[in-house]
Amino acid sequence: MKIFKISAILVTALGVTGCVTNPITGRSSIQIANNSEIATAAASEYKTTLSKAKVITGTADANRIKNVGARIKNAAYAYYKSIGRESALAGYSWEFNLIQDNQLNAWCMPGGKVAFYTGIMPVCKDDNGVAVVMGHEVSHALAGHGNERISQAMLAQYGGSLLGGTMSNSQWAGVFEKVYPIGAQVGLLAYGRKQESEADEMGLYLMAMAGYDPRTATSFWQRMESSSTGSRTPEFLSTHPNPQNRIADLNADMPKALQYYKAAGGKL
């Protein structure tokens, strides 16, 4: 009982100063880690990952990744500016790269470091498909899901010592590496179902704001589900919502997404 009371006080105290509300979805989460430190660590790991990979440049798919990424990034900036929240994106330094790898996967690290694997491109098929994935992954970064997961790890490991205290460099590095495994799987942060669902919703809105048809999202996720072979699920789907639930949620969010799409000049 005593441990529970201490934990409750800790969560309440941290919630006062570390509660962040997503301006697009309205979801609130505890984010007590330093965003600048997270972005710096992510940028370093991203650079290391690219140095060990075959980065594809100059191809139609590579250019598509950069172009779609830029449009969704610009749409996000325009939205945040329209609500007076552009300062929240000041620390982002965006990169969009295509990596030669047969995995059906893509990811975005904190600070806007995006990677698509060539294996997912046939499933994307076109700009709209890339926009579905791009919107989803960029949303993880914009929503601070990395900070949220790191904060959860910090609380689990150090608990009350976080109140009024500081973490050493080694402690911080240990938490970051626990959440973002070092090596080829660096981008595969195991987000929770709530975060994945939020990335679906926010990503749907962002792609619509950027002028991509949000109605194509359901067919993309159906193609991703069909790409599963036997009992093997693509890493991209391993922590994601049940396919039927995902489609239902996307359809529920579609009217709002179509409003954004129409405002961006899309034809209904």
Image: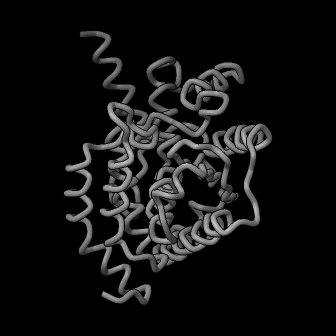
Q: Residue at x 35, y 21 (%)?
A: 7
Residue drawn at (26%, 52%), measured in percent from left and top?
A: 246
Image height check: is 39 above or below 74? Answer: above
Q: Nearer the viewer, residue 92 or 224?
A: 224
Residue 32 or residue 77, whichever sits in front: 77
Position of residue 19 measured from the top left corner of the image (x, y, whole percent): 41, 45
Q: Percent from the top left, x then y, of residue 116? A: 59, 52
128 on left or right of 196: right
Is 139 drawn above or below residue 265 in the view shown? above
Q: What residue do we see at 50% from left, 48% from top?
A: 144
How many numbered marks have been drawn onto this rendered protein structure? 0
The location of residue 87, given as percent across then percent down, is: 59, 64
The quadrant of the picture occupied by the N terminus is top left
Q: Residue furthest front?
A: 230
Residue at coordinates 74% horizontally, 50% vertically from top-left? Answer: 55
Q: Position of residue 125 (x, y in %)?
A: 48, 65
